[in-house]
Image (spheres, rainbow, N blue to C red):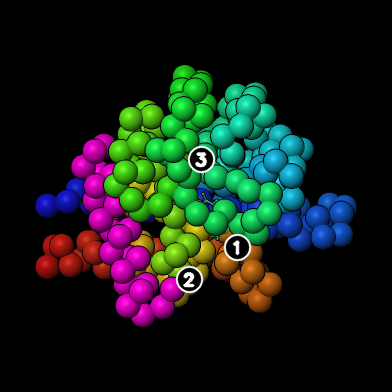
Amino acid sequence: MTELFDYLRLGVNIDHVATIRNARGGYHPDPLRAAHVASKAGADGITAHLREDRRHMTDIDISRLIADIDLSLNLEMAATDEMLQIALKHCPHAACIVPEKREERTTEGGLDATGGYDQLAPIVAALVEKGIRVSLFIEADGRQLDAAKSLGAPVIELHTGAYCDKFGAERDDELQRIREAATYAAEIGLECHAGHGLGFDTVAPIAEIPQVVELNIGHFLVGEAIFGGLESSIKRMRSLMDNARADISDRRSA
Ligand code: PXP
Protein backbone atom coordinates (compact mmCIF):
# COMPACT_ATOMS: atom_id res chain seq x y z
CA MET A 1 0.00 0.00 0.00
CA THR A 2 1.20 3.53 -0.78
CA GLU A 3 2.72 5.28 2.21
CA LEU A 4 0.31 7.95 3.39
CA PHE A 5 1.58 11.23 4.70
CA ASP A 6 -1.39 12.29 6.79
CA TYR A 7 -0.68 15.96 7.11
CA LEU A 8 -0.67 18.14 4.03
CA ARG A 9 1.25 21.39 4.42
CA LEU A 10 -0.06 24.65 3.01
CA GLY A 11 2.39 27.21 1.69
CA VAL A 12 0.66 30.54 1.09
CA ASN A 13 2.06 32.46 -1.84
CA ILE A 14 1.78 36.18 -1.07
CA ASP A 15 3.10 37.57 -4.38
CA HIS A 16 -0.19 39.13 -5.31
CA VAL A 17 -0.46 41.12 -2.11
CA ALA A 18 2.64 42.84 -3.48
CA THR A 19 1.02 43.09 -6.93
CA ILE A 20 -1.81 45.13 -5.42
CA ARG A 21 0.60 47.28 -3.42
CA ASN A 22 2.72 47.93 -6.50
CA ALA A 23 -0.31 49.07 -8.51
CA ARG A 24 -0.11 52.32 -6.54
CA GLY A 25 3.41 52.21 -5.08
CA GLY A 26 3.74 52.88 -1.39
CA TYR A 27 3.32 50.35 1.38
CA HIS A 28 -0.25 49.07 1.35
CA PRO A 29 -1.16 46.22 1.42
CA ASP A 30 1.98 44.96 3.13
CA PRO A 31 3.08 41.39 2.20
CA LEU A 32 4.66 41.00 5.63
CA ARG A 33 1.31 41.67 7.28
CA ALA A 34 -0.23 39.10 4.93
CA ALA A 35 2.40 36.59 6.03
CA HIS A 36 1.44 37.15 9.68
CA VAL A 37 -2.25 36.68 8.83
CA ALA A 38 -1.39 33.49 6.92
CA SER A 39 0.45 32.16 9.94
CA LYS A 40 -2.52 32.88 12.19
CA ALA A 41 -4.89 31.23 9.70
CA GLY A 42 -3.00 27.92 9.68
CA ALA A 43 -0.46 28.22 6.87
CA ASP A 44 2.66 26.12 7.32
CA GLY A 45 4.93 28.27 5.19
CA ILE A 46 5.15 31.40 3.10
CA THR A 47 6.06 31.31 -0.56
CA ALA A 48 7.34 34.34 -2.45
CA HIS A 49 8.64 34.64 -6.00
CA LEU A 50 11.33 37.24 -6.57
CA ARG A 51 11.13 37.81 -10.31
CA GLU A 52 13.90 39.29 -12.40
CA ASP A 53 11.63 42.26 -13.21
CA ARG A 54 10.48 42.62 -9.53
CA ARG A 55 6.88 42.93 -10.72
CA HIS A 56 5.53 41.87 -7.32
CA MET A 57 8.00 40.92 -4.58
CA THR A 58 11.00 43.19 -4.12
CA ASP A 59 14.39 42.57 -2.55
CA ILE A 60 13.27 44.53 0.51
CA ASP A 61 10.18 42.30 0.84
CA ILE A 62 12.40 39.20 0.89
CA SER A 63 14.68 40.74 3.54
CA ARG A 64 11.70 41.70 5.69
CA LEU A 65 10.10 38.25 5.36
CA ILE A 66 13.34 36.52 6.31
CA ALA A 67 13.75 38.80 9.32
CA ASP A 68 10.19 38.84 10.62
CA ILE A 69 8.05 35.82 9.82
CA ASP A 70 7.59 32.91 12.18
CA LEU A 71 7.02 30.46 9.29
CA SER A 72 9.56 29.01 6.91
CA LEU A 73 10.11 30.87 3.64
CA ASN A 74 10.03 29.11 0.28
CA LEU A 75 11.75 31.42 -2.21
CA GLU A 76 10.67 30.88 -5.79
CA MET A 77 13.46 31.80 -8.15
CA ALA A 78 14.66 31.49 -11.73
CA ALA A 79 17.84 29.54 -12.35
CA THR A 80 20.04 32.61 -12.77
CA ASP A 81 23.22 33.69 -11.09
CA GLU A 82 21.54 36.81 -9.72
CA MET A 83 18.85 34.76 -7.96
CA LEU A 84 21.36 32.20 -6.75
CA GLN A 85 23.39 34.94 -5.05
CA ILE A 86 20.24 36.32 -3.40
CA ALA A 87 19.20 32.86 -2.16
CA LEU A 88 22.67 32.13 -0.81
CA LYS A 89 22.70 35.51 0.96
CA HIS A 90 19.30 35.04 2.67
CA CYS A 91 19.45 31.28 3.10
CA PRO A 92 15.67 30.66 3.12
CA HIS A 93 14.34 27.34 4.37
CA ALA A 94 13.53 26.33 0.78
CA ALA A 95 14.06 27.43 -2.79
CA CYS A 96 11.79 26.41 -5.63
CA ILE A 97 13.36 26.80 -9.05
CA VAL A 98 10.83 27.92 -11.63
CA PRO A 99 11.00 28.79 -15.33
CA GLU A 100 10.60 32.52 -15.87
CA LYS A 101 9.78 34.61 -18.89
CA ARG A 102 9.40 38.36 -18.74
CA GLU A 103 6.46 38.33 -21.17
CA GLU A 104 4.39 35.78 -19.23
CA ARG A 105 1.63 36.76 -16.80
CA THR A 106 2.40 33.89 -14.47
CA THR A 107 4.64 30.82 -14.42
CA GLU A 108 3.10 29.20 -17.46
CA GLY A 109 4.61 25.76 -17.48
CA GLY A 110 7.10 23.59 -15.69
CA LEU A 111 10.85 23.82 -15.80
CA ASP A 112 12.65 21.83 -18.49
CA ALA A 113 14.88 19.88 -16.13
CA THR A 114 16.14 17.64 -18.96
CA GLY A 115 16.95 20.33 -21.55
CA GLY A 116 18.17 22.75 -18.88
CA TYR A 117 20.22 20.17 -17.01
CA ASP A 118 23.61 21.83 -17.42
CA GLN A 119 22.32 25.24 -16.36
CA LEU A 120 20.46 23.80 -13.37
CA ALA A 121 23.14 21.46 -12.07
CA PRO A 122 25.50 24.05 -10.49
CA ILE A 123 22.58 26.06 -9.09
CA VAL A 124 20.93 23.04 -7.45
CA ALA A 125 24.32 21.92 -6.11
CA ALA A 126 25.10 25.33 -4.60
CA LEU A 127 21.70 25.59 -2.90
CA VAL A 128 21.84 22.04 -1.56
CA GLU A 129 25.35 22.62 -0.26
CA LYS A 130 24.09 25.67 1.63
CA GLY A 131 21.41 23.49 3.31
CA ILE A 132 18.50 25.04 1.38
CA ARG A 133 15.74 22.54 0.52
CA VAL A 134 15.57 22.65 -3.27
CA SER A 135 12.50 21.88 -5.29
CA LEU A 136 12.02 21.97 -9.04
CA PHE A 137 8.70 23.14 -10.44
CA ILE A 138 7.97 20.66 -13.22
CA GLU A 139 5.20 19.15 -15.29
CA ALA A 140 3.84 15.74 -14.36
CA ASP A 141 6.18 13.93 -16.73
CA GLY A 142 8.40 10.95 -15.86
CA ARG A 143 11.42 12.33 -17.77
CA GLN A 144 11.29 15.55 -15.79
CA LEU A 145 11.12 13.60 -12.54
CA ASP A 146 14.11 11.48 -13.57
CA ALA A 147 16.06 14.63 -14.40
CA ALA A 148 15.14 16.21 -11.04
CA LYS A 149 16.35 13.07 -9.29
CA SER A 150 19.65 12.99 -11.13
CA LEU A 151 20.17 16.71 -10.48
CA GLY A 152 20.04 15.92 -6.76
CA ALA A 153 16.94 17.99 -5.96
CA PRO A 154 15.17 16.34 -3.00
CA VAL A 155 11.76 17.81 -3.86
CA ILE A 156 9.63 18.39 -6.94
CA GLU A 157 6.55 20.56 -7.20
CA LEU A 158 4.06 19.39 -9.82
CA HIS A 159 2.45 22.14 -11.92
CA THR A 160 -1.33 21.94 -11.45
CA GLY A 161 -2.15 24.82 -13.84
CA ALA A 162 -3.40 22.66 -16.75
CA TYR A 163 -5.52 20.57 -14.36
CA CYS A 164 -7.15 23.76 -13.02
CA ASP A 165 -7.65 25.35 -16.45
CA LYS A 166 -9.43 22.37 -18.02
CA PHE A 167 -12.87 20.89 -17.45
CA GLY A 168 -14.59 17.51 -17.61
CA ALA A 169 -12.71 14.59 -19.12
CA GLU A 170 -9.71 16.77 -19.96
CA ARG A 171 -9.36 17.79 -16.33
CA ASP A 172 -9.66 14.14 -15.28
CA ASP A 173 -6.82 13.27 -17.65
CA GLU A 174 -4.63 15.98 -16.12
CA LEU A 175 -5.48 14.74 -12.65
CA GLN A 176 -4.51 11.23 -13.62
CA ARG A 177 -1.15 12.47 -14.95
CA ILE A 178 -0.52 14.25 -11.65
CA ARG A 179 -1.47 11.14 -9.65
CA GLU A 180 0.88 8.97 -11.69
CA ALA A 181 3.71 11.48 -11.39
CA ALA A 182 3.20 11.70 -7.60
CA THR A 183 3.34 7.91 -7.33
CA TYR A 184 6.50 7.81 -9.43
CA ALA A 185 8.08 10.62 -7.39
CA ALA A 186 7.61 8.62 -4.20
CA GLU A 187 9.01 5.48 -5.88
CA ILE A 188 12.23 7.24 -6.84
CA GLY A 189 12.54 8.98 -3.47
CA LEU A 190 11.46 12.53 -4.32
CA GLU A 191 9.26 14.54 -1.96
CA CYS A 192 6.23 15.67 -3.90
CA HIS A 193 4.56 19.09 -3.73
CA ALA A 194 1.96 20.60 -6.05
CA GLY A 195 0.58 23.98 -6.92
CA HIS A 196 -0.53 26.66 -9.38
CA GLY A 197 -4.05 27.82 -10.05
CA LEU A 198 -5.64 25.90 -7.18
CA GLY A 199 -8.88 27.21 -5.71
CA PHE A 200 -11.71 25.98 -3.48
CA ASP A 201 -13.22 23.98 -6.37
CA THR A 202 -10.05 22.28 -7.52
CA VAL A 203 -8.02 21.64 -4.37
CA ALA A 204 -9.65 18.47 -2.98
CA PRO A 205 -8.66 15.95 -5.70
CA ILE A 206 -5.04 17.14 -5.47
CA ALA A 207 -5.12 17.08 -1.65
CA GLU A 208 -6.33 13.48 -1.84
CA ILE A 209 -3.18 12.30 -3.60
CA PRO A 210 -1.40 10.57 -0.73
CA GLN A 211 2.16 11.21 -1.91
CA VAL A 212 1.65 14.98 -2.09
CA VAL A 213 2.87 16.56 1.15
CA GLU A 214 2.66 20.29 0.38
CA LEU A 215 0.49 22.60 -1.70
CA ASN A 216 1.51 26.14 -2.63
CA ILE A 217 -1.43 28.41 -3.29
CA GLY A 218 -1.55 32.15 -3.86
CA HIS A 219 -3.58 33.97 -6.48
CA PHE A 220 -6.94 32.47 -5.56
CA LEU A 221 -6.46 33.10 -1.83
CA VAL A 222 -5.55 36.74 -2.36
CA GLY A 223 -8.44 37.21 -4.81
CA GLU A 224 -10.90 35.57 -2.46
CA ALA A 225 -9.64 37.79 0.36
CA ILE A 226 -11.34 40.72 -1.38
CA PHE A 227 -14.69 39.17 -0.57
CA GLY A 228 -14.17 37.55 2.81
CA GLY A 229 -10.77 38.55 4.14
CA LEU A 230 -7.41 36.80 3.88
CA GLU A 231 -7.67 34.92 7.15
CA SER A 232 -11.03 33.48 6.19
CA SER A 233 -9.92 32.44 2.67
CA ILE A 234 -6.83 30.67 4.04
CA LYS A 235 -8.81 28.98 6.83
CA ARG A 236 -11.35 27.67 4.33
CA MET A 237 -8.59 26.34 2.05
CA ARG A 238 -6.89 24.74 5.05
CA SER A 239 -10.10 22.98 6.05
CA LEU A 240 -10.81 21.77 2.49
CA MET A 241 -7.31 20.27 2.44
CA ASP A 242 -7.73 18.69 5.88
CA ASN A 243 -11.11 17.24 4.96
CA ALA A 244 -9.78 15.74 1.73
CA ARG A 245 -6.93 14.19 3.67
CA ALA A 246 -9.25 12.85 6.37
CA ASP A 247 -11.45 11.31 3.67
CA ILE A 248 -8.59 9.24 2.29
CA SER A 249 -7.57 8.14 5.79
CA ASP A 250 -11.16 7.06 6.46
CA ARG A 251 -11.36 5.16 3.17
CA ARG A 252 -8.15 3.35 3.96
CA SER A 253 -9.18 2.30 7.44
CA ALA A 254 -12.74 1.27 6.37
N1 PXP B 1 3.91 27.10 -7.05
C1 PXP B 1 4.76 27.73 -7.89
C2 PXP B 1 6.07 27.09 -8.16
C3 PXP B 1 4.41 28.96 -8.48
O1 PXP B 1 5.27 29.56 -9.32
C4 PXP B 1 3.18 29.56 -8.14
C5 PXP B 1 2.83 30.90 -8.70
O2 PXP B 1 3.76 31.84 -8.36
C6 PXP B 1 2.35 28.89 -7.24
C7 PXP B 1 2.72 27.65 -6.73
C8 PXP B 1 1.05 29.46 -6.80
O3 PXP B 1 0.20 29.58 -7.90
P1 PXP B 1 -1.15 30.40 -7.72
O4 PXP B 1 -0.77 31.79 -7.38
O5 PXP B 1 -1.80 30.25 -9.05
O6 PXP B 1 -1.92 29.73 -6.61
Q: Label 2 near label 3: C-beta < 8 Å? A: no
Disc 1 CB within 8 Å of nearest ligand 1 atom: yes
Query: Which residue reaches farthest bottom?
Result: 168
Q: Which residues are magenta?
A: 166-190
Answer with left or right where residue 127 lies relative to residue 152.
right
- Give the camera-side residue of 205 and 171: 171
Q: Nearer the viewer, residue 101 or 183?
A: 101
Give whichever of discs 2 and 1 has the lower sequence position: 2
- Residue bearing the label numbered 2: 165
Q: In the picture, which quadrant includes the C terminus?
A: bottom left
Magenta: main secondary structure equals helix
Distance Cα–Cα, label 3 vs label 2 = 22 Å
Q: Earlier in the sequence, mark 3 or mark 2?
A: 3
Q: Position of residue 86 (x, y in %)?
A: 66, 29
For mark 3, give the secondary structure. strand
Name the residue carrying label 3: 96
Q: Nearer the viewer, residue 66 or 184?
A: 184
Q: Is residue 137 visible?
A: no
User: Is residue 156 magenta-colored?
Assistant: no
Is 5 positioned to the left or the right of 240 in the image? left
The answer to whether residue 41 is left or right of residue 160 is right
Q: Where is residue 226, by image quadrant?
A: bottom right
> Which structural element holds mark 2?
helix
Which amino acid, by three-letter code, is at mark 1? His
What residue lies at 36% left-to-right and 43% top-to-bottom?
144
Mark 1 highlights which residue?
Answer: 219
Residue 239 pos. (x, y %)? 43, 66
Numbered marks: total: 3
Check disc 2: other Cα within 10 Å, few if <14, some if 14-19, many if 20+.
few
Q: Within 8 Å of ligand 1, the CB of disc 3?
A: yes
